Image (cartoon, rainbow, N blue to C red):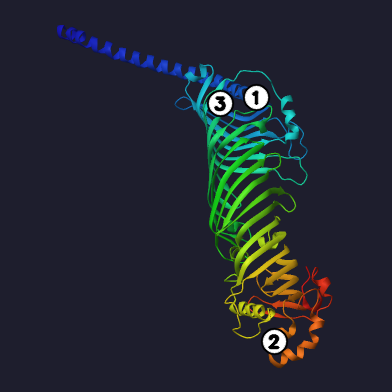
């Protein structure tokens, strides 16, 4: 009995301790359940609260109506917030431009993380927001004033975001101009970092340019956003364009790289940069040549047009200056390039190597050039879409074809009245040329082409194909010497009676001539069978096998 009582007394503290533990566990469990309930209530209340805050913040920031299709809050080491179908309105439908139809900003999906305590702070602070499928639609300038009519004007921004990370973004610049397409920029990824209240955001962007195909990287500053006039939002930065494959443009070839800087507003961005293409080529010639440019350009956001003022280019060792525009058009879809080009002193062989398949180039020498250049949009090769009109002067020209040059040397000697071989014949005769030309459909047409060597002046009109497979020129040759002075012996005696018939307009001899054939087999000759020489000097005829303009 005594032992039993003693045993009971010893076991009593253990039972008390065991029960106390269960009470502590139960209390902790109760607190956890209560905490979960509280958090559930927080989440339940946070979702509509945060949704309202997001809408209010964006509505106030952009002064516009805001729609949000889906919005969710979950507990994952704090608050995990996600949403989809975010639209900020303010301007136009792409077809009829009625305000309120087309969102100026459209977001496919977004999500961010924040601490629970941050929900109760004012303003609410978010470190990073992630976005996919962002599209920014800038309205035409003509509808800018409509922005002032959309959405609330007053309110307090309740959410501050330090960083925005975006995949697959697009900037669309709309226009009301007839025949103009919207200007579109597809951006693969974009990171924007807040610098300070009321300050521009720093950004880093990467995008793939479709034509020519290549990667563009840019970093700079954007903003502050101008809700009443989005096009007046400031932007500045630097860019690099690497490994751009010009072969994605029919008729061109080579790998282009470019670097530069830009500044201004979305409506008018001023760009200064340079390009290098060590193997630039046109398909019709196939000759790779180094091309370097330095340019100053203005981009008009109302139309997407780019104005080049100027472009300084260097092809091999020849330099030129161009001013003009690159304009987007609808029919056919693409860009129309229009330039005024001036080359004060270049090398004719540099230009011929770029433009003509003949190798080596037909001639060498110095050239001065003024031309209006136009490249039409379309899918055809560049050579068939390129148009040029202008004039040129070539000095010190020497033909690379030895047979051709020998004929030139011999003609010069004879027309100076020195028909005997070796009679004061110069080693190499240099030629002078000038002319007025038109290039279309890969065919050069000359309304006036003057060729001069010592003793001879030839005035021609005709055509020359860029592939070098066709010469077709007709005109007149004026020579210092008379016919009888160009030959020796009995031939000279026979020709003396006819000298007066060919001595015209102050020349010793004036006769009709032609230059025909191909690059490999050019032919000089008199052209007594060609009719209406005076008329043909200005307008080549289809008679005698010549080709029309």
Q: Which mark is residue 329?
A: none
Instruction: Give the mark nearer the N terminus: 1 vs 2.
Output: 1
Q: Residue at x 68, y 67 (%)?
A: 433
Select label 2 or label 3 by which is in front: 2
Residue at mark 1: 59
Cα gap from disc 1 to disc 2, whole angstroms: 95 Å
Q: Is residue 527 left or right of residue 39?
A: right
Q: Quadrant of residue 501?
A: bottom right
Q: Is residue 245 left or right of residue 144?
A: left
Q: Nearer the viewer, residue 192 or 11?
A: 192
Label 2 residue SS: loop
Label 1 residue SS: helix
| Residues at circles 3 and 1 in contact by the CB criterion of under 8 Å | no
**As displayed, is residue 401 above or below residue 171?**
below
Within 10 Å of disc 3 (Cα), the crowding (few <14, some 14-19, many 20+) is few
Residue at mark 3: 199
Instruction: Give the mark nearer the N terminus: 3 vs 1.
Output: 1
**Picture coordinates of residue 307, whole percent (x, y):** 67, 45
Cα gap from disc 3 to disc 1, whole angstroms: 19 Å
Q: Quadrant of residue 530?
A: bottom right
Q: Residue at x 60, y 71 (%)?
A: 398
Label 3 residue SS: loop
Within 10 Å of disc 1 (Cα), the crowding (few <14, some 14-19, many 20+) is many
**As displayed, is residue 46 above or below residue 497?**
above
Q: Which mark is residue 487?
A: 2
**Picture coordinates of residue 402, whole percent (x, y):** 58, 78
């Amino acid at each position: 009995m005594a032992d039993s009582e003693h045993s009971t007394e010893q076991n009593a503290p253990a039972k008390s301790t065991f029960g106390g533990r269960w009470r502590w566990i139960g209390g902790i469990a109760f607190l956890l359940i209560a905490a979960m309930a509280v958090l559930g209530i927080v989440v339940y209340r946070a979702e509509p609260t945060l949704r309202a805050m997001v809408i209010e913040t964006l509505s106030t920031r952009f002064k516009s109506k805001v729609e949000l299709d889906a919005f969710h809050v979950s507990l994952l080491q704090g608050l995990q917030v996600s949403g989809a179908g975010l639209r900020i309105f303010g301007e136009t439908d792409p077809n009829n431009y009625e305000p309120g139809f087309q969102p100026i900003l459209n977001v496919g999906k977004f999500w961010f993380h924040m601490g629970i305590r941050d929900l109760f702070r004012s303003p609410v602070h978010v470190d990073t927001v992630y976005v996919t499928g962002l599209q920014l639609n800038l309205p035409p300038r003509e509808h800018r004033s409509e922005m002032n009519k959309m959405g609330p004007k007053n309110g307090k921004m309740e959410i501050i975001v330090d960083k925005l990370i975006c995949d697959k973004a697009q900037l669309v610049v709309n226009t009301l101009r007839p025949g103009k397409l919207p200007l579109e920029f597809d951006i693969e990824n974009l990171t924007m970092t807040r610098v300070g209240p009321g300050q521009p955001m720093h950004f880093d962007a990467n995008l793939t340019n479709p034509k020519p195909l290549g990667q563009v990287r840019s970093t700079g500053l954007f903003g502050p956003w101008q809700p009443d006039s989005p096009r007046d939002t400031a932007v500045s930065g630097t860019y690099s364009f690497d490994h751009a494959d010009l072969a994605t443009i029919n008729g061109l070839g080579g790998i282009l790289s470019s670097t530069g800087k830009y500044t201004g507003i979305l409506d008018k961005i001023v760009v200064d940069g340079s390009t290098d293409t060590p193997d630039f080529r046109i398909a019709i010639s196939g000759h790779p040549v180094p091309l370097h440019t330095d340019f100053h350009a203005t981009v008009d956001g109302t139309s997407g047009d780019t104005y080049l003022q100027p472009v300084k280019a260097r092809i091999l060792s020849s330099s030129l200056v161009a001013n003009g525009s690159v304009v987007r058009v609808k029919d056919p879809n693409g860009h129309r390039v229009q330039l005024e080009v001036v080359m004060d002193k270049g090398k004719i062989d540099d230009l011929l190597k770029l433009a003509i398949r003949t190798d080596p180039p037909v001639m060498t020498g110095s050239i001065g050039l003024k031309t209006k250049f136009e490249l039409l949009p379309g899918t055809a090769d560049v050579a068939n879409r390129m148009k040029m009109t202008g004039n040129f002067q070539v000095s010190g020209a020497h033909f690379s074809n030895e047979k051709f040059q020998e004929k030139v040397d011999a003609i010069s000697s004879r027309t100076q009245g020195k028909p005997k071989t070796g009679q004061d014949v110069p080693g190499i005769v240099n030629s002078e040329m000038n002319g007025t030309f038109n290039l279309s459909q890969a065919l050069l047409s000359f309304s006036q082409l003057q060729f001069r060597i010592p003793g001879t002046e030839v005035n021609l009109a005709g055509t020359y194909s860029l592939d070098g497979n066709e010469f077709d020129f007709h005109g007149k040759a004026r020579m210092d010497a008379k016919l009888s002075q160009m030959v020796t012996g009995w031939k000279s005696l026979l020709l003396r009676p006819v000298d007066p018939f060919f001595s015209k307009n102050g020349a010793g001899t004036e006769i009709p001539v032609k230059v025909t054939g191909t690059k490999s087999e050019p032919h000089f000759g008199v052209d007594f069978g060609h009719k209406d020489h005076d008329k043909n000097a200005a307008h080549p005829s289809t008679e005698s096998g010549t080709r029309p303009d």
